[in-house]
Image: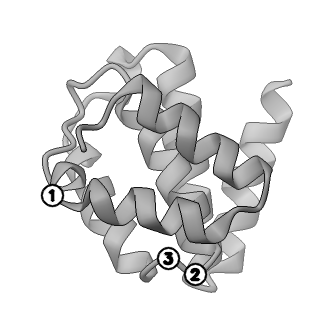
Amino acid sequence: MALSQRLLIQLNNALAHRDVVRGFALLDEADKEWQKLSPSDPQATAFLVCLAQWVSLGYRDSSYVDRLLERFADISRKDLPFGNYVRLRFAEAQCAFISDDMVSAIEIFKFVLDIE
């Protein structure tokens, strides 16, 4: 299953309805596609946030998302559209939270909340 807008909607709906079995199945079906996720994909940060939320529910471990986040390490964040930047920071906060790095998680979540 390709990483598509449809998949993102299905995963987010499964999250909203707490349908963990369905969400895990969707994630597993798209496993090979996650490995192809690129910062150049316009939906990449939305997928990262979604995946980080699923990992916080027990899908795999934080290293799964960390490996994907590493692909964003060398991109110029100032060149990201603002929404993508915020989603990237949110995904980083989720990963810090999952990894029990509460200091980093709180700092990043505070930044995200302060944007409002």
Which residue is nearer to you in this view: 20 or 54?
Answer: 20
Mark 2 = which residue?
58
Which labelled disc corresponds to residue 1? none
Amino acid type of the residue tagged 1 in the rendering? Lys
Q: Answer above or below: position of 5 versus 105.
A: above
Q: Answer above or below: position of 78 versus 14.
A: above
Looking at the image, is mark 1 or mark 2 earlier in the sequence? Answer: 1
Looking at the image, is mark 1 or mark 3 earlier in the sequence? Answer: 1
Mark 1 = which residue?
32
Q: Horizontally, is 65 left or right of 89 in the view? A: left
Residue 106 position, x and y percent, is 76, 64
Label 3, secondary structure: give it: loop
Q: Horizontally, is 56 left or right of 74 in the view? A: right
Residue 45 position, x and y percent, is 43, 35
Q: Residue at x 59, y 71 (%)?
A: 21
Which labelled disc corresponds to residue 59? 3
Local crowd at mark 3 within 10 Å, few (<14), some, or many (≥20)? some
